[in-house]
Amino acid sequence: MSGTRLFSPFEMGSLHLRNRIVIAPMCQYSATDGQMTDWHLIHLGNLALSGAAVLTIEATAVLPEGRISYGDVGLYSDACERAMGGVLDGVRRWSDMPIAIQLGHAGRKASSEVPWKGGRQINPKDEGGWKTVAPSPVPFHDDYDHPVALDRAGLAQVRSAFADAARRAAALGLDAVQIHGAHGYLLHQFLSPLSNRRTDDYGGTLENRMRFPLEVFEAVRAAFPADRPVTMRVSATDWAQNGWDIEQTITFCQALEARGCSAIHVSSGGLASHQQIAIGPSYQVPFARAVKENVAIPVIAVGLITEFEQAEAILTTGDADLIAIARAILYDPRWPWHAAAHFGERVWAPDQYLRSQPRQLRHLFDR
């Protein structure tokens, strides 16, 4: 029996998790025409040996124009599906860690340069750029190209693309889908009054602004096998005046729960270029706590959770059910091993690495 919450098992639908450590989706900007490359085999394979409970594939575009950058992964074609399938075959050959995928559409934040080249939007007239779409023709920055407001046909195309990508994910045997409704991307753009200036049924009131993200959730839930979880990542606040906030987030999460959402992953920000974020350790955990107090489904906390005792405290105080690690596990791909050693717990390791177990930790690795 585990002595900590962090290393206690957890059930989410058909998903059996060995512990409460979730590897969050992290963009690598290393795909070619939406297709995964050898980098993804190295990256995901490395993380799949970490001893965490579940690995989430980075934000994966449901349409070519939904990619954040020209280097983003997609799941909108047979070629994308084949490339991802090859990577997954390699990872699964050596790890039985459940693998989820985050499906998304970048909306007005698409057509961007990769981060190590500045990350700013590429003009649609320039190489590597394309015309973006959004709820309203409001750019992320004043000097960015104005996106095209999605009409009814455009909305139907995006909904259908999310469902098609979910079916491809199911065919690839992925264990769960997370829908990206955070960080200022398309679904978040519909939710926030700062980016959604529509006057039809998809804009104005909170009910109307939630309508399209909820339709997308319903489409994905219907397309993905009923026994496998579909979750949503949300930004709890825009960190900007008159924007999306925690009260609206709670209402949205309750609507998701009513439609069969399996868990809520609570992040924040990314929508407003003038956001003022109060960053510090666990800075987003209060938002996770607020959501958890108002829904019955599992809640995942994320955001500058780097220390072992910090992660355990978030769980033991009831602020969240699961902990998501992102940059911390890029820096230390054996974060779960080191956490288990710290607490005197046991953790999975591949046979090839068993001899690395420290002599003073004779029961660290779980056989």
Image (cartoon, rainbow, N blue to C red):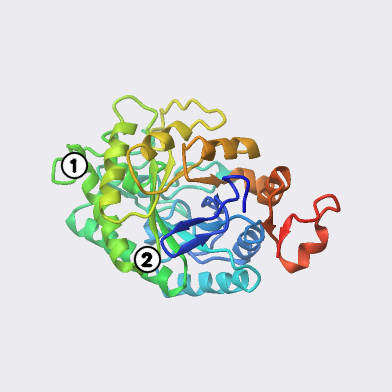
Q: Residue furthest left?
A: 200
Q: Considering depth in this image, is 37 or 363 the residue closer to the camera?
A: 363
In the rendered image, the quadrant that contains the C terminus is bottom right
Could you tell me residue 319's position as x and y percent? 46, 36
* Whether residue 146 is visible: no
Mark before the other along the chain sequence, 1 or 2: 2
Depth check, front residue: 266 or 72:
266
Amino acid type, mark 1: Glu
Tag 2 residue: 166
Please report the residue visible at 81 percent of the width from the left and 58 percent of the height from the top.
356
Q: Nearer the viewer, residue 255 or 332?
A: 255
Residue at disc 1, secondary structure:
helix
Q: Secondary structure at mark 2?
A: helix
Residue placed under numbered mark 1 in the picture: 207
Mark 1 surroundings within 10 Å by alpha-carbon count, few (fewer than 14), some (14 through 19), many (20 or more): some
Counting every numbered tag in the picture gives 2
Residue at image location 30% in from the left, 56% down from the top: 260
Q: Do the residues bearing badges 1 and 2 touch, measured as CB atoms within 8 Å?
A: no
Could you tell me residue 80's position as x and y percent? 47, 70
Taking the image as shown, residue 154 lies to the left or right of residue 292, namely left
For the point 59% across and 39% down, which residue is it? Answer: 312
User: Marks 1 and 2, how far apart in space?
Assistant: 25 Å
